[in-house]
Amino acid sequence: MGKKSFDLPQECWELIIKSLNDHHMETLSLVSHTLLSITNHLCHTLTISTQPIQFLPQLFHRFPNLNKLILPRFQPDLDSLLFQISQSNLNLQSLILYPQFTFPLRGIQQLGSKMTNLKELNCSGMQSLQCRDLCAIGNSFPFLQVLDISFTDSFDVNDDGIVDLSLKLKSLREINLSGNFLLTDESLVALSSNCLSLRKVVILDYFLSDEALVELCKFFHSLRSINLNSCYNLTNTSFFTLTRECSLLTEIKMERTKLGLELFVTGCMVGNTQIICQNLATNDNLSDDFIIKIGSICPNVQVLDVSHCSGITEEGIVETLKNFKGIRHLNMNHCNGIKGFNIDFDLPKLEVLEVEGSVMNDDALAAIGKKCCGLLCLHLQGCLNVTRRGVKHVVENCRALREINLKQCIIDGDLVAWMVSARPSLRHIIPLWGFVPTENLRGFFLRHGCLVG
């Protein structure tokens, strides 16, 4: 019986193994030579440690279908390592180089002469990156789609280098320029004008202003996602310009900006039904008026993060959610201005609700249980006003609930066993601090398929 179980066609084994995580794949590789061979062929990502370079050909032979390599941090002889990779027959699609002391110019040029189909290159944290290195990247990998040159600790990466890149990387879809303080609007204009497939630009910590973004949006017609976290000079003008000018935009990230400081100009606000994800966390000036306006012009938002926004109240979030009937994930962690969640309408699609560190109480949980019946995950960590009564409301009414976080809540430990028994769908409970189940309870939890801890 045991022997026959291995006589499945290889295609069947591949389907089975693909459904498992990496830990199980590693375990299966120890069972038999057949499974070892199959798992080797299914391995697509390899992190190269500090083993001697001469052993690399053996690794590449063992894993012939590798398409992503992650190189060791601060590798002293990176050029030689890249030369070895270039001599393999791998169909390399992604290369992660971060962080390194110096850019491996000769190695990149050698790799590019053999593997021009590279789609992703990550040089984040590359020290002393220069414009000539950007030129080499453009020449070596003309079909590059994703490039990360963020936080390179370099004072040589300037607009000239980015302009040169934009002329060579016509297929570029995503780029991260964060932390390159010499760049100006000229770089973004060049990327927007020359890289017609560009969908995502990440710009953290530097120079961007409302005036610059207004001009740039003229070139962002195909933009799908933008990350402007920590662009401290951006205000409401930037947000509403993006929603008005970028008709294909689906995701906006504007954490730690000046959202909420300006007055609203009604003529600048135009509806945008494409935007489904907004991350506006840690904006102290964000107000009820602002998020209510968001609800009126972006009615199809499915993911909203307003965590650590102390200016938002219960009235503002409830009024906003009246327009977000398709909301799936709502993060209100540490929103001290939100004292409750007393909604009188259904949110049938809400699956994840995060209210950690808030002053939510049992009445709010009762409303959640009644109006958010499709809830899968609830984070209540640090909600000191919540008691067993409120938790029971949620567990009894949210029939698909799979995960609940009660850490730092003041709740009796015996409630955990009741929850596991009362709601069979639960798969993970993070209990209050100090909860230590007995052996019998552990067995009870496992029999119900619920991880407690």
Image (cartoon, rainbow, N blue to C red):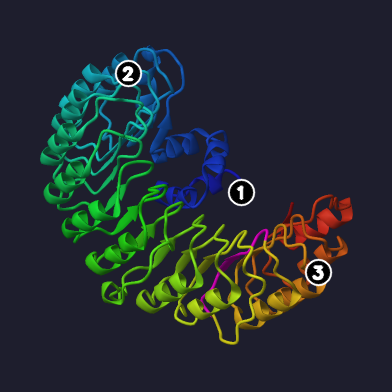
In primary-sequence order, the first of circles 1 and 2 is 1
Question: Picture coordinates of residue 348 (x, y %)?
Answer: 54, 80
- The answer to whether marks 2 and 3 mark residues whose Cβ atoms lie closer than 8 Å is no
Q: Which stretch appears magenta? A: 348-357
Residue for point 54% across, 36% down: 26
Residue ID for mark 3? 387
| Amino acid at circle 3 | Thr
Question: Picture coordinates of residue 316 (x, y %)?
Answer: 53, 75
The residues tagged by marks 2 and 3 sit, at their Cα atoms, a distance apart of 56 Å
Mark identifier at residue 1: 1
- Is 365 displayed left or right of 312 in the figure? right
In primary-sequence order, the first of circles 2 and 3 is 2
| Amino acid at circle 2 | Thr
Numbered disc in front, either 1 or 2: 2
Q: Is residue 353 magenta?
A: yes
The residues tagged by marks 1 and 3 sit, at their Cα atoms, a distance apart of 53 Å
Q: Is residue 433 magenta?
A: no
